[in-house]
Every structure is written in structure tokens, then in C-alpha cells.
Image (spheres, rainbow, N blue to C red):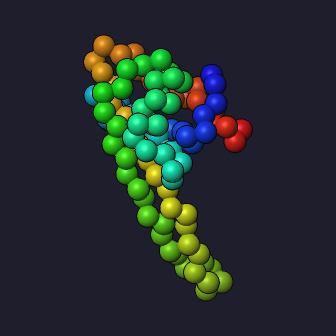
């Protein structure tokens, strides 16, 4: 599997596992990625047909550490990619990001 500079990796939660039945897959992407570049990268890496891409910006959270200082988590961005009905499902378990 080729590496990607746009896609950081899959997101596995209970909700994303439920959405896979409707051919909707959720992935982490870089902050500068837009819908068109995400669609092209998914189609290039996985050889599938993308019907829709929804992008969600996840704000960073602040939390109090044990020492009493405030720690800020980084901003992140995720994309929910819906495939066309005739397309094969994505194999997100075999994905490798460019950082590995």
C-alpha cells in the first residue's frame, strides 16, 4: 500500500463501525486538506469511487494535569467518506501513513 501525505490514518469508534454498513468510512486528515484533495487521495490509494466527502474540524481541548498546569490538546480534522454503492469497501486496516 502506498503512503499518503494527506491521510493520517483511520478512526475506529463504535459510531464509525456502525457507519461502515452504509459504506461511510471515517479517517484522520491533515489540517490543510480540503474535500477535493481527500477525494482524489482516497480514489488513488484504494481504487474506489467516492460519492461524498464531509470534513469535520475537531477543536483542541484543555485539561488540567496532576501538577496543576493546563495542557492543550492539538486541533485535528477528520473526514467522513461515503463510497458509491458499486464500489468495493475500503481496507483501512492495511493503511500506512507517511510518518511510519
Residue 38 or residue 11, whichever sits in front = 38
The residue lying at 55 percent from left, 67 percent from top is 73
**Marker count (numbered):** 0
- Residue 34, image quadrant: top left
Q: Residue at x 39, y 40 (%)?
A: 35
Residue 71, position as x, y percentages in the image? 59, 75
- Give the camera-side residue of 34 and 81: 34
- Which residue shows up at 61% across the image and 86% down it? 68
Give the left or right position of residue 80, taking residue 32 as reference. left
Q: Position of residue 50 (x, y in %)?
A: 36, 26
Q: Nearer the viewer, residue 10 or 47?
A: 47
Note whether 76 is above or below 99 in the view shown.
Answer: below
Q: Is residue 23 visible?
A: no
Check the image and name the residue furthest to the right: 100
Q: Where, by quadrant of the figure, is residue 14 drawn?
A: top left
Q: Position of residue 12 (x, y in %)?
A: 46, 41
From where the camera sits, is residue 64 visible?
yes
Amino acid at each position: 500500500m502506498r503512503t499518503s501525505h494527506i491521510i493520517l490514518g483511520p478512526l475506529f469508534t463504535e459510531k464509525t463501525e456502525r457507519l461502515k454498513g452504509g459504506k461511510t468510512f471515517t479517517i484522520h486528515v491533515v489540517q490543510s486538506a480540503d474535500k477535493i484533495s481527500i477525494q482524489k487521495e482516497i480514489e488513488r490509494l484504494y481504487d474506489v469511487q467516492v460519492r461524498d466527502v464531509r470534513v469535520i474540524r475537531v477543536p483542541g481541548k484543555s485539561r488540567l494535569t496532576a501538577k496543576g498546569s493546563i495542557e492543550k490538546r492539538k486541533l485535528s480534522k477528520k473526514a467522513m467518506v461515503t463510497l458509491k454503492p458499486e464500489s468495493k469497501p475500503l481496507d483501512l486496516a492495511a493503511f500506512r501513513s507517511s510518518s511510519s
